[in-house]
Amino acid sequence: GESVGLHLPTLSVQEGDNSIINCAYSNSASDYFIWYKQESGKGPQFIIDIRSNMDKRQGQRVTVLLNKTVKHLSLQIAATQPGDSAVYFCAENMGGGSYIPTFGRGTSLIVHP
Amino acid sequence: ETGVTQSPTHLIKTRGQQVTLRCSSQSGHNTVSWYQQALGQGPQFIFQYYREEENGRGNFPPRFSGLQFPNYSSELNVNALELDDSALYLCASSSGQGASADTQYFGPGTRLTVL
């Protein structure tokens, strides 16, 4: 079946570096994508989203890029801080009038001071 | 904090038992979704309720059922518990419905252990 997956299960960076977390999706019908951050002992927290009619969206220190040609999504975090350490999930919504996001497996981001 | 609360925080049950997990959504959020998150995995969609009616369901058997109440609270019921049901159960609330649903706000989850 079609699924959302992540290329790297763990990413280690130094404080102040930029981080890039990647996500591959295989459902061409997906029209809405979301990145979540999950800290230990907490539920996922919305970071940023993007619709399929866009290829880039920026937030505070975060940027999401969408490449529909290769079905690839990335989350860029600028000037990564220790508080950014968490598991990051991408999720896709297949549209069709429903909002039922499918989550990928997650990438663990470790930020070293 | 998201304004979404869940109870209990942790729960231990034995195989074959039944369990009820509870969620209190943000005021004004008419949509609630429930997810199962196994260790090391992303959340898996169980079902979604909008204005007290089921609005979508994932690939979970009928022994997973839910209820949504007018006071923005909801329940997830699981009958005949199996060992593989051990997971973190998350609820998420949002305003709107379907494709117009606003951002989902997740609760902290209930950690269920089935022995």
Image: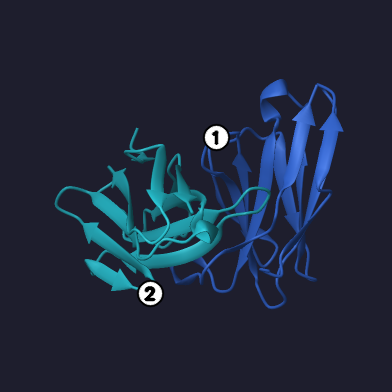
Chain colours: A cyan, B blue
Of helix, strand and loop, which one carries label 1? Answer: loop
Q: In the image, what residue occupies the spot 77% across and 27% down? A: B81
Q: Is residue B29 left or right of residue B45?
A: right
Residue A58 location, quadrant: bottom left
Q: Residue A43 placed where, x, y %? A: 63, 54
Given residues A96 and A35, the one toward you in this image is A35
Position in image of residue A91 (x %, y %): 42, 52
Residue B9 sits above or below residue B24 on the image? above
Chain designation of label 2 = A
Report which quarter residue B108 is drawn in.
bottom right
Looking at the rendered structure, the kind of residue marked 1 is Gly
Judge by depth and name the residue closer to the eye, B46 or A24: A24
Question: Left or right of A104: which side holds B88?
Answer: right
Number of numbered callouts drawn? 2
Q: Mark 2 highlights which residue?
A: A59
Q: Residue furthest bottom?
A: B28
Q: Measuring from the top left, give residue A15's x and y in whole percent.
A: 42, 57
Q: Amino acid at mark 2?
A: Gly
Residue to which mark 1 is pinned: B40
Q: Position of residue A100 (x, y in %)?
A: 48, 54
Q: Give the residue drawn at x 75%, y 69%.
A: B72
Q: Quadrant of residue B4?
A: bottom right
The secondary structure type at the circle numbered 2 is loop
Looking at the picture, tell me which residue is in the foreground, A44 or A3: A44
Please say whether residue A29 is visible from this viewpoint.
no
Label 1: how many Cα within 10 Å (few below 14, some 14–19, many 20+): few
Q: Point out the residue furthest to the left here.
A: A69
